[in-house]
C-alpha cells in the first residue's frame, strides 16, 4: 500500500516472486470509469473506491485458499484497510511504502505511459492515513532498490503480529 508512485507494483511483483506466490495488480481491477477519472486528473471518492476495494477483497480471500497472494493496492484510508481485512478473513498484512514528496514526484515524473498524472500526488498524500500502529503493518522506506525494499518487507513480514 501507499500513494501513487510509491512503487507498489514494482515491489509487490518482487515480493511475490520471493514468496513464490501469485501477484495481482490492483490497478487492473479499477472500473474504466475510475481510470478515466484519474486520467483526467480527478481524484477518486470513497464511492468510486468501494466496488474496486471489494474486488480486491475477493482476490485476497481467494488467495488465502491458495497459499496466499500479494496484491498492490493504494489502501489509503483506515476504513479501506479495515474493509480489506474483513474481506480477507484474517491475517492480512500491509506493507506500507513510505517516501518523501520529492522522491515520489521524481519517480512519477520519470514514469512513462501511465494513466496517473503527477498532479494527483498532492491529493493522494492528503488522503493517506498512515497505517502505523495498526495490526499487521510493515513500514519500509522506498529510498532503496526494489530488491532491497522487497527484502526489507520480507524481513518485516516474518516478524509481523496481528
Ligand atoms: N525502488 C525504486 N527505485 C527506483 N525506481 C523505482 C523504484 N520503485 C519503483 N520505481 C519506479 O517508480 C515508478 C513508480 O513505481 P510503480 O509504478 O511501481 O508505483 P505504484 O505505487 O504502483 O504507482 P501507481 O499506484 O501510480 O500505479 C515506476 O516508473 C517504477 O519503475
Ligand atoms: O485509491 C486511489 O486513488 C487509486 O488506487 C490510486 O492510488 C491509483 O490506482 C494509483 O495510484 C494508480 O496510479
Image (cartoon, helix red, strand yellow):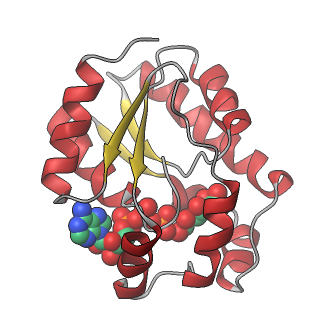
Q: Residue furthest right?
A: 47
Q: Position of residue 78 (x, y in %)?
A: 67, 35
Quarter of the figure with residue 69: top left
Asked whether 24 or 102 is in front, the reply is 102
Residue 49 vs 152, above or below: the answer is: below
Residue 137 in view:
yes
Q: Position of residue 158 (x, y in %)?
A: 24, 19
Please indicate whether residue 155 sits to the left or right of residue 55 in the image.
left
Q: Residue at x 36, y 76 (%)?
A: 107
Please indicate whether residue 151 sits to the left or right of residue 32 in the image.
left
Residue 60 vs 130, above or below: the answer is: above
Residue 120 vs 73, above or below: the answer is: below
Q: Position of residue 13 (x, y in %)?
A: 28, 51
Quarter of the figure with residue 151: top left
Quarter of the figure with residue 65: top left
Looking at the rendered structure, the number of numbered marks drawn on it comes to: 0
Q: Quadrant of ligand 1?
A: bottom left
Residue 22 vs 104, above or below: the answer is: above
Asked whether 99 or 15 is in front, the reply is 99
Q: Position of residue 123 (x, y in %)?
A: 69, 68
Q: Residue at x 32, y 43 (%)?
A: 140
Q: Residue at x 39, y 58 (%)?
A: 99
Please indicate whether residue 62 sits to the left or right of residue 122 in the image.
left
Residue 20 in view:
no
Amino acid at each position: 500500500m501507499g500513494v501513487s508512485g510509491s512503487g507498489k507494483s514494482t515491489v509487490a511483483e518482487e515480493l511475490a516472486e520471493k514468496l513464490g506466490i501469485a501477484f495481482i495488480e490492483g490497478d487492473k481491477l479499477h472500473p474504466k470509469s475510475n481510470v478515466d477519472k484519474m486520467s483526467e486528473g480527478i481524484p477518486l471518492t470513497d464511492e468510486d473506491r468501494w466496488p474496486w476495494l471489494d474486488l480486491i477483497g475477493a482476490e485476497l480471500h481467494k488467495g488465502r485458499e491458495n497459499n496466499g497472494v500479494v496484491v498492490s493496492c493504494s489502501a489509503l484510508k483506515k476504513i479501506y484497510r479495515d474493509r480489506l481485512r474483513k474481506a480477507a478473513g484474517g491475517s492480512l498484512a500491509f506493507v506500507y511504502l513510505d517516501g518523501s514528496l520529492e522522491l515520489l514526484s521524481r519517480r512519477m515524473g520519470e514514469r512513462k505511459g501511465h494513466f496517473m498524472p503527477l498532479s494527483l500526488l498532492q491529493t493522494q498524500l492528503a488522503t493517506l492515513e498512515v497505517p502505523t500502529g495498526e495490526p499487521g503493518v510493515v513500514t519500509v522506506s522506498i529510498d532503496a532498490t526494489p530488491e532491497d525494499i522487497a527484502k526489507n518487507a520480507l524481513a518485516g513480514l516474518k516478524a509481523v503480529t496481528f
